[in-house]
Image (spheres, rainbow, N blue to C red):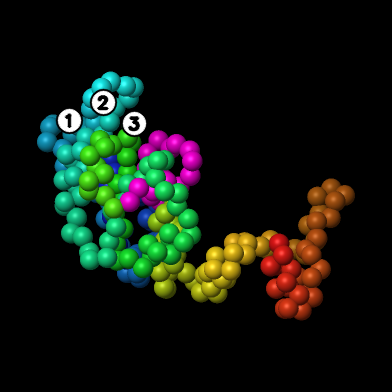
């Protein structure tokens, strides 16, 4: 699967793409990334990507021309989707992650300033938000969605059982995560002992499953 990211701050993705399972998945050629600098598609020597808003208002608005040119520079795959990241979009969830993971390509448009010229709506497939709050730009939102989507691609996770349990949780409307514990069995802070629940030490898999389902 390929992820294309249109941004004016491409270096925000440097460490994101060089660590952990994403890096391993890139090395195994399970996923591919193309970070596109929108400034490369400007026509003036200052590489201007924003301007004042028609009708007045605070802040600057990202210009449509360089973003459109950046989009046109991408050779789209057949099963692809262009996503504008905006607080006004549809809220992202796990079901959407599942849907996106079946595509060949995702193209993210990351806005900045007061937003993007509204004519961008003619060139995107979907507007998505990661929550009802405002960030400085769409880059972090793109990373959140990428993290959620790429791990659903076969071969990217070390333990497939983790994914199977998560999938079961979603389809059965049970909790996404249950409380988990590891050694030591007893963790002491001052006079207080914090113990692992006895049921998890019992070896009774049926009861353990019931315990986890209820938490």
Residue pictured at 12% horizontal, 36% vertical: 43
Q: Can residue 21 be seen in this view?
A: no
Residue numbers of the magenta segment: 126-143
Q: Is residue 71 visible?
A: yes
Q: Tell me the residue that label 2 is attached to.
A: 53
Front-lying residue, 178 or 40: 178
Above/below status of 121 relative to 107: above
Q: Is residue 10 left or right of residue 133?
A: left
Residue pictured at 24% horizontal, 31% vertical: 50
The alpha-carbon separation of the residues under discs 2 and 3 comes to 9 Å
Q: Are marks 2 and 3 in contact (CB under 8 Å)?
A: yes
Residue 161 in percent (x, y) is at: 55, 74
Above/below status of 16 relative to 45: below
Q: Do the residues labelled 1 and 3 touch (CB within 8 Å)?
A: no
The secondary structure type at the circle numbered 1 is loop
The secondary structure type at the circle numbered 2 is loop
């Amino acid at each position: 699967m390929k992820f294309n990211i249109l941004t004016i701050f491409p270096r925000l993705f440097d460490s994101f793409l060089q660590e952990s399972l994403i890096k391993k998945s890139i090395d195994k050629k399970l996923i591919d990334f193309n970070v596109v600098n929108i400034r490369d598609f400007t026509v003036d020597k200052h590489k201007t990507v924003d301007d004042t808003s028609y009708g007045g208002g605070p802040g600057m608005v990202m210009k449509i021309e360089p973003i459109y040119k950046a989009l046109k520079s991408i050779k789209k795959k057949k099963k692809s989707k262009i996503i504008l990241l905006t607080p006004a979009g549809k809220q992202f969830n796990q079901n959407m992650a599942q849907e996106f993971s079946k595509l060949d390509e995702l193209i993210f448009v990351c806005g900045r300033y007061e937003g993007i010229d509204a004519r961008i709506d003619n060139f995107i497939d979907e507007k998505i938000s990661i929550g009802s709050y405002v960030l400085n730009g769409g880059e972090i939102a793109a990373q959140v969605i990428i993290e959620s989507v790429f791990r659903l691609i076969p071969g990217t996770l070390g333990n497939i059982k983790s994914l199977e349990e998560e999938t079961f949780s979603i389809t059965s409307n049970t909790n996404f995560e249950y409380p988990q514990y590891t050694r030591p069995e007893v963790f002491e802070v001052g006079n207080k002992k914090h113990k692992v629940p006895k049921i998890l030490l019992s070896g009774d898999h049926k009861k353990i499953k019931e315990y986890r389902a209820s938490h």
